[in-house]
Amino acid sequence: MMEPVVELSCELIRRASVSPEDAGCQALIAQRLAAAGFAIEHFPFGEVENLWATHGSGGPVLALLGHTDVVPTGPLDAWSSHPFEPDIRNGLLYGRGAADMKGSVAAMVIALERFVAAHPDHPGTVALLLTSDEEAEAIDGVRQVAARFRETGQRIDWCLVGEPSSRERLGDRSRVGRRGSLSGYLTVHGVQGHVANPHLARNPIHELAPALAELCATRWDEGSADFPPTGFQVSNIHAGTGANNVIPGQCSVVFNFRYGTVTNAAELKARTEAVLQRHGLQFDLHWHASGEPFLSPPDGRLRAAVRTAVLDACGLEPDFDTGGGTSDGRFIAPLGAEVVELGPVNHSIHKIDEHVAVDELHTLVDIYAAVVGRCLVDPMR
């Protein structure tokens, strides 16, 4: 007989919830948590499903945060087993979303059921927030829910995110902040013409090249103790008609900044535009900020609870850092919450044959339940 966390993980993996689809994952979880005494609210935005399940009342409020959507599978014939048919081999559970992050979501649900059964009259509020829009646009998911909470005054004091944070073994790393992400969509305008008559045309590639080289070579800041220096990367560049004898009329570039707390989006925008203008380019530039950087305090109760819970369950202390990409924690931190991320080993996420260790799922339930208890019931334990 399967352990509850493994059984629920398998049930979630069977639902082909490729972002922004939820495929019934949240309905299944809502039914379980309602039976455990949770109040259930659904916040659909566009095609996205969002679930807010709460137990208790008043403050403090501890929210566990996760997502039910997954990335596409890639070629099915490259998988050792069907990505939406969970398969356990050699102590590993295989399937799309096993590590990112249906295993964590299942562990959160089981931990919450265990906690409220043991502490039906606990102080404050414990909650689960789920979205089906984390892996794709992240527009109608937690971003929208956070905006709603801001309007309604819904507080969140602590937010434990179940993203796969661990490096080599469960609990060896936890994220306590993330860099901001700012993308630029640049179009440089030239004049199309024949390559044999460059004096009658203006090549936007040639005009952009020195400016782009300067942007790539710029040292934007020196970073800090908590964040590395700001990074600038070009992810896409396109120009031309496909013919080898036509000077293109425009060149389009997509680039991205990852930055910490020593700079800000407004400064990065201004410095970028100043470079482009200094090089005399005719351009259009549109910006998209997908999240500001955040850093949780080193003496926060949630961080302390995670440290102790991991030490008790895994026999090690996690390294707390701010590496990696972004997570939905970036939308909750501005509400005033302390945000900490802790989940399973992440080396197989988004890959063919994604998997998670079954033993890790069991331990993750213990960790999540202990964190909830240390925050709401017995912080000095």
Image (spheres, rainbow, N blue to C red):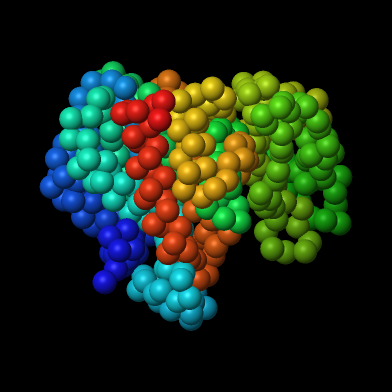
| Nearer the observer, 32 or 290 | 32
The quadrant of the rendering that contains the C terminus is: top left
- Please identify the quarter of the rendering in which residue 88 is found: bottom left
Q: Find residue 368 and report its horizontal and vertical position in percent.
A: 38, 43
- Is residue 40 in view from this perspective? no
Residue at image position (56%, 32%) is: 177
The quadrant of the rendering that contains the N terminus is: bottom left
Q: Find residue 373 and report its horizontal and vertical position in percent.
A: 34, 34
Q: Is residue 55 shown left or right of residue 136?
A: left
- Please identify the quarter of the rendering in which residue 54 is found: top left
Residue at image position (20%, 25%) is: 57
Q: Find residue 65 and report its horizontal and vertical position in percent.
A: 37, 40
| Nearer the observer, 281 or 157 | 157
- Please identify the quarter of the rendering in which residue 6 is found: bottom left
| Nearer the observer, 69 or 313 | 313
Q: Is residue 171 shown left or right of residue 137?
A: right
In the rendered view, tell whether residue 325 sits above or below residue 8: above
Residue at image position (14%, 40%) is: 37
